[in-house]
Image (cartoon, rainbow, N blue to C red):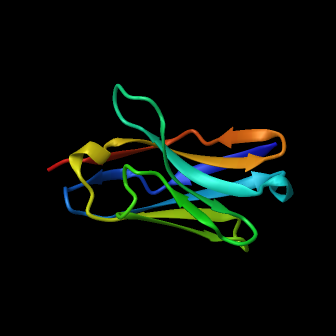
Amino acid sequence: QVQLVESGGGLVQPGGSLRLSCAASGSIFSIYAMGWYRRPPGKQRELVATITKDDGMTNYGDSMKVRVTISRDNTKNTVYLQMISLKPEDTAVYFCASMGPGGTSWGQGTQVTVSS
């Protein structure tokens, strides 16, 4: 089983930047990819970005594609999401996920609020 702990969310002004972190523990040897999803208020969860563990291949969802960068530090079992030029519509709960042969594990989520 994999445990995921997100950090870095909070309140940011429009146009601002934020970096989210997600630390994995537990059965990390089984992870082949990690990623970020978000759930805006009243909407369904959507893909933000994923990254494979071994070769760092990335995949970005359409909603934030040019404004986010996903990266990983395998020595720390941590994945990051750098977000720039944030907009009010980016307000959401951001979830970290890990993918492995047993399925997907989810973090508790971290709130990101973009507001002046």
**Above or below, 34 relative to 71:** above
Q: Which residue: 59% across, 53% down? A: 35
Residue in front for this viewpoint, 57 or 88: 57
Taking the image as shown, residue 2 lies to the left or right of residue 93, namely right
| Residue 43: quadrant of the picture | top left
Image location (x, y in percent) of residue 113: 30, 45
Residue furthest toward the left? 116
**Above or below, 116 relative to 82:** above
Q: Which residue: 54% across, 64% down? A: 80
Taking the image as shown, residue 37 lies to the left or right of residue 112, namely right
Q: Which residue: 73% across, 74% down? A: 75
Image location (x, y in percent) of residue 108: 57, 38
Q: How many marks?
A: 0
Q: The N terminus appears in which quarter of the rendering?
A: top right
**Above or below, 116 relative to 77:** above
Image location (x, y in percent) of residue 72: 62, 69
Q: Which residue: 31% across, 47% down? A: 90
Residue in front for this viewpoint, 64 or 80: 64
Image location (x, y in percent) of residue 4: 66, 48
Taking the image as shown, residue 33 lies to the left or right of residue 96, namely right
**Above or below, 6 relative to 51:** above
